[in-house]
Image (cartoon, rainbow, N blue to C red):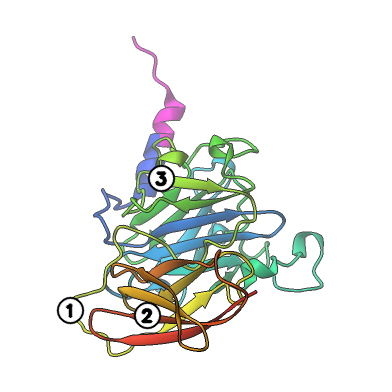
Amino acid sequence: MKSFDVSRFVFSLAAVAFLGNATAQAQCSDLFFSEYIEGWSNNKALEIYNPTDAQIDLSDYRIERYSNGATAAEDNQKVALEGTLMADDVVVVVLDKQDPDGVDFEAPVWEELAAVADLWLCPVYADNNTMYFNGNDAMVLRQISTNDVVDVFGKIGEDPGTTGWAEVTQNHTLVRKQSVTAGDVNAIDDFGVYDQWDSLEVNTFDQLGFHFCDCGTTSVLETPQRMELDVFPNPASGEVVFVRSNVGFHSLTLRNLAGQEVQLQSVNGRKVAEVDLGAVAPGLYLVEAWNEHGLRSTHRVVRK
């Protein structure tokens, strides 16, 4: 008689229970993780992207942590989100360590990370430790009302060791590839990190607050009445800034205070654009954006 691996069978049943109603995720139809920050000390964050054309109520979603190969998340390893996430936008969820006088396990997150935080969660480890991941914990994004898994980072039931999966999920920043248009809902498949993620150096925070995705579109159902711009980092100490708008825009112009055109670029209807300031002298400039509906908006930017 052929031998039977009971432990594998038990885990398979647990995996089925975990998956709930999870099925193949339709493209651009639901939230997914767009960035993963596992930095030094308490520099831990998850960015979540809305690829749809509609705003989404975040209170219907939660993050779950499956620690060190666990096949189940404890109650204090599940934390609900809050707020509303607009279409083609992101929410940056950060471990809630904000005390400037904190030391050791209570050390504050770095200022660069705090500056882009939208939602602070899990200030006290004993109460809820969902956001205290350290590179070898699988992280799950789940819709509460349906119990559907909408995205998984890592592999449930597998402990990849102290250096994490592919040796890049600890002490690294990972950014979801632009070609990814839906979350990974299969929790027990091998975690092919490089298939869907780009790896950056530890404590890299300048890709947070926006996400490039092939889903990104402006809804044709409603013509926006106003364009709002945001420029970051601002002041700009490096050679690149990002311009973000609430609606897609098609052209972007950088002008000096005399109104003279310094730089012009096409954006092709996206809501986020990268502006290269490498050849721009230090000073105060005006960013001007236009969209196909004739909406115009401006924003000041300082080049250090």
Q: How many marks?
A: 3
Q: In percent of the image, x 43 and y 26: which residue is there?
A: 6
Does residue 99 appear in this view?
yes
Residue appearing at x 43%, y 29% in the figure: 8
Residue 49 placement (x, y as % from top left): 40, 64
State if disc 3 and disc 1 touch (CB < 8 Å). Answer: no
Residue 302 spot, x, y in % from top left: 59, 79
Rendered location of residue 97, percent (x, y) = 69, 68
Callout 2 amino acid? Ala
Q: Amino acid at mark 3?
A: Gln
Looking at the rendering, which quadrant does residue 100 occupy? bottom right
Amino acid type of the residue that numbered disc 1 sits on in the rendered structure: Leu
Above or below for 273 versus 220: above
Q: Earlier in the sequence, mark 2 or mark 1?
A: 1
Using the image, tell me which numbered label, if any, was put on residue 82.
none
Work out whether residue 84 can be spotted. Answer: no
Q: Which mark is residue 221?
A: 1
- Tell me the quarter of the image containing the N terminus: top left
Report whether 71 appears left or right of 247. right
Q: Label 1 to label 3, Cα distance in Å?
A: 31 Å
